[in-house]
Structures are given as C-alpha cells and as structure tokens.
Amino acid sequence: MQLARVIGTVVVTRKDANLAGITLLLVQPLTPGREPAGRPLVAVDAVGAGVGEEVFFVRGREASFPFHPVEAPVDAGIVGIVDHWHIG
Amino acid sequence: MLLAKIVGTVVATRKDPGLVSSKLLIVRPVDPKGKAEGSYLVAVDTVDAGVGETVLIVSGSSARMATGMKDCPIDAAIVGIVDTIDVPS
Amino acid sequence: MGTVVSTQKHRKFEGAKLLMVQPLNLDDTPRGHVLLAVDGVGAGVHEKVLVVIEGRAANEALGTKGAPVDAAIVGIIDHVTIDADI
C-alpha cells in the first residue's frame, strides 16, 4: 500500500458494467514528508474518501476485493483514510 | 488505473486464440491535465472506444477482470471512456 | 520506519497494524518509494524486515482471505551475509 492525497475526481459514463456505482478518484502518491512520489493515478474508493484527504491505497487485483462478489476491473483502490502517521 | 489517450489501432492476424475478436488499441498515458507522459502501450478495448478519446486503463492481472476477458492473456484493458476530470487547485 | 493510524478503513483491516517501510538496497541505502505494509510478525519501528509485495502472498501471510492488501511484513531480519566475491 502507499500513502496518497486525493487530488480530484474522474467522471466516466461509458464503462465496464462492473464499474457501475463505483467512485473514481485521482490520487497523488506521497512520501512520508508529503512530497509527490511518482505520477498521479486513478483509484476506486472503498471508504468514502474525498478530495483533499490523505488516504492509503492498495495496488493490484486486491483493489477489487471490497466490491466482492462483483469482479470490478480495477488495479488501485483506496482502502483507508489516514488520521495521522508517525515516523520513528 | 491510468488515464490515457487513444492514439492508434493494432491489427494482428496471428495471435493467441484468447485474443481473437479483441480490439487492440495503442494508448499513451496522460496526466490529469491531459498532457502525454511515459511510453505507449497496447490495451484491449472493452467499451468501444475510439482514436482521440481519453480512457481509463486497468493494468496487470486486474485487466482480465474486464468484461469478456476472463482467462485471456492480456495485461492492459480499456474499461471506461472519460467524460471529465476535475482537479481543484 | 513509522506507523500509520487510520480509523476509517476497510473492515478487513480492523485490528491490523499498518507500518511504513522503506525498501533497501543490499548496502542499506533506500530503494524506491516508501510503502505501507500490514505487520504479520510483531515488527517495530527501525527494525529491518522482510516484506512480500504481492496480494495473494500477503493474504496468506496474514491468514486472511479477500483482504485488500498488497504488502505484508513476513519476517524480522537478524542479519544478511553477502559474499563479495560473487
């Protein structure tokens, strides 16, 4: 998983039937110092995240698990909203 | 998933049986402002997209979860046509 | 290298300890971006650990099924030996 900030939304009308009702958000991966870590990407939202929030997201097929039994064709999904993080 | 713009089509006569009747398109990832970045890739189209459109790409083993692609040897699929991208500053 | 606190998360994460890990090169220099991994072995901040970065393996390690995780800490490293001649 990676830390990220939600930076925007994506609207997609014509899409795979198994994406129906799933929110698509643009996320910018972050370093623990809140610097951008790589390029922004599109992730599905499984926890009710909003623009501006800091979240963590999972990559790969596991991103579809929150939507089980629907087999959503997704490879990145927000699975938590971060309250805070602490670097030792 | 990635945002990408469709820049071309691929025709392949001899291919894996799992790809027969699949439409292959050449796409190039774009940033949220629509600027092209990174290298081109070939993706299977499952939503009847066309050249010039901005689309949503799913990569890796998840691509096989696109409708009709179960057990097909693919690593990238177009699963949506993007209407709008909103990035508040 | 750190811990992450999240109240609102997918229910399969309840009770899981989420740690920040920095992948390392053989010479202990940082390699790539920091990742979040679920702790399966009771690791602590600053320890050198072994991480699987693959969803199915992570689920195996955590004893979960269908959890949306892609990385898990599966070991705490005592030491690494490298043969400089090879």
Image (spheres, coloured by chain):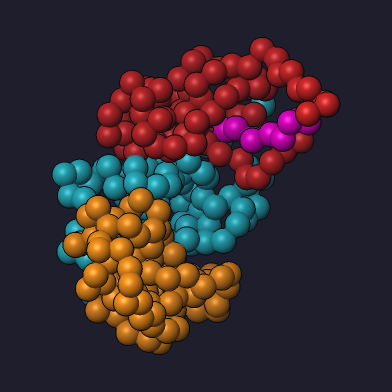
Q: Position of residue B59 (x, y in %)?
A: 40, 58
* Left or right placement of residue A39 versus residue C85 in this view: left
The chain in red: C
Name the magenta segment's main secondary structure: loop
For the point 78% across and 29% down, the residue is C86
The residue range painted magenta reads C18-28
Residue C22 highlighted magenta (yes or no): yes
Q: Position of residue C79 (x, y in %)?
A: 70, 15
Q: Nearer the viewer, residue A21 or B78?
A: B78
In the rendered image, the residue lying farthest to the bottom is B52
Q: Nearer the viewer, residue A53 or B50?
A: B50
* Left or right placement of residue C29 versus residue B17 in this view: right
Residue B11 highlighted magenta (yes or no): no
The image quadrant of residue B14 is bottom left
Q: Is residue A66 above or below residue C2?
A: below
For the point 42% across and 71% down, the residue is B42
Rendering colour (chain B): orange
Q: Position of residue B41 (x, y in %)?
A: 47, 70
